[in-house]
Amino acid sequence: MSHEMMILVLQLGVIIIATKFCGTFFSKKLKQPKVLGELVAGMLIGPYVLGAIPLPGIGPLFPVMAGSSVPVSVQLYGISTLGSIFLLFNSGLETDLPTFLKFSGKATVVGFGGVIISFLLGAGITVLLHPEVHSIMDPEALFLGTVCTATSIGITARILSENKKISTPEGVTILAAAVLDDVISIVLLSVVVGISTVEMNGGSIAWSGIGLVALKAVGFWALCMVVGILLAPRFTKGMKRIRSIGIVAEVSFGIALLLAGLSEMAGLAMIIGAYITGLSLSQTDVAHEISERTKAVSEYFVPVFFAVMGMMVDFGAMKSVLGFGILFALIAFIGKLIGCGAPSLLVGFNLHGALRIGAGMLPRGEVTLIVAGLGLASGAIGPDMFGVAVMTMLLASLAAPPLLVATFKGGSGYKKSLAVKEVPDIITIELDFPNRRAVDFVRRSLADGFRGEGYFITSLEGVNPAWQIRQDETIVTMAVINGTKLTLSAKQQDESFVRLMITETLADFQEFADSLKTMESPDMMGARLLINMFSDEDQQREKVSAEQPAAKKK
């Protein structure tokens, strides 16, 4: 055991260093997503390239594991699985739940379209180019058709997160459709395994048993979604009584691990349970705090996941089926682009949005390997067809990231004619200050006041510096405009509380300034300079006398 742990530690050290350098190179020099560099790093240091070179005293650092569907050790594969759970948990936290629910119906249409078209094209091309395969009900055609259906939500989520596109209409549609794709693919896999087992053994198909497995998987997914969304606010409200956000974040991730394990028990992929947990917590006021704490750890584990995916690529096994593999990968691309892109045109997206959704559904990953691995283990497909599945995953993983990034350049992909124009009951309070230092002083004082009342403050992306101040259902947005104007926006029912916080802050600010002005001792020169930092004496008198009445008037 000590020897195995030593090897594991060395492997992790090499993986983390290689992925960080490759990821940075691809991001900074080639202007490509980091995930692409991490995949390439895994290919280079993996068991089929540099990892096979014997090292003094330990032999190959990444030896091929004989008798296993994956070429890496169980320990390393386990840590990569943990990385995928971290990734999908954080992706769920970053997803805007109302937008997700709003577009879930559209995502269902997109997901089903992608699965049906991809399965028919994948199974059809297998029958067409392999004379020994007589119909799409042949085990080999069934498995390769199923290989085409799965989408790598991990790769897509990483790209959308890096580019701040997770909560766009296209982003949530892609993620929701990708989750649905994986659910359907796992259900379809259970059907295919049942049919293939019967076909190879010459028995009759037990449709009732297959249907029960499929129903259990779908029911578990739907139940967890509903229960998680309903209970998450109550859970965080109870956990905040502990008064330790660190404990809240740790317990939340523990729940994500539990639900990931239960998902696997129900016949689904672990990542689906992790994503559901993050999505359920995404609308709570502590979502950002949880995300910040888990991301600090996930930065070490997520690259391991993508590196291990890259290590799956056996270049030698692809030689005999290189032509068919490239053609099959192309068919798999077309299946997702048409199968997901065309239906999206019917549910409110324009051509630009349809292309984004099609590109976002291109990547293949862990579910593809699960399907292919089961097919190889059962004897339904041989090592050559397993190589085709891996080649499809490789080409899709390399082609999809730059294509997805490129498609998101430009305007909205949602049809303006179908956009719902909502008139929110939002009020905005504006405060003008003489200079940047004054507005910054008041902003910080306001933030401290809100924190004292139990609010959580999150920095927002945008042209102007902005922050979201949140506690349960109360949300206040604070922004600095042009350096000297402070704005606070909130719902009408929260207006009186926000105005009270502003009045108290300005009163404290005035009292503080007045107290400093009365200090005439030479030792208090620093205090006098502090007053001058805000404005000259005339401006300061005008500001102190007019500031609070002006705030009340506004």
Image: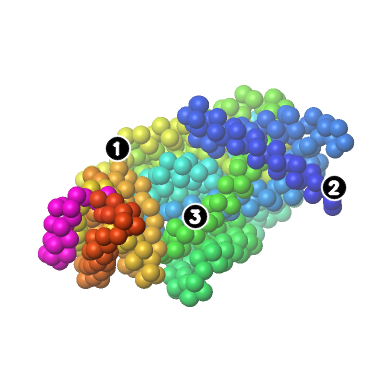
Which residue is painted at 65% across and 35% down in the image? 18
To which residue does mark 2 refer? 3
- Total numbered labels placed on residues in the image: 3
Q: Give the number of the disc on residue 292.
A: 3
Q: Give the number of the disc on residue 411.
A: 1
Q: Which residues are magenta?
A: 533-554
Q: Circle 2 — which element?
A: helix
Instruction: Give the mark nearer the N terminus: 3 vs 1.
Output: 3
Amino acid carrying label 2: it is His
Which residue is painted at 43% across and 70% down in the image? 233
The rendered magenta stretch, by its main secondary structure, is classed as: helix
Measured Cα–Cα span from mark 1 to mark 2: 55 Å
Amino acid carrying label 1: it is Gly
Disc 3 + disc 1, Cβ < 8 Å: no
Examine the structure image and report whether residue 30 is included in the region drawn in magenta.
no
Q: Which-is-in-front pick, marks 3 and 2?
A: 3
Note whether residue 179 is visible: yes
Q: Which-is-in-front pick, marks 3 and 1?
A: 3
Which residue is painted at 38% across and 69% down in the image? 452
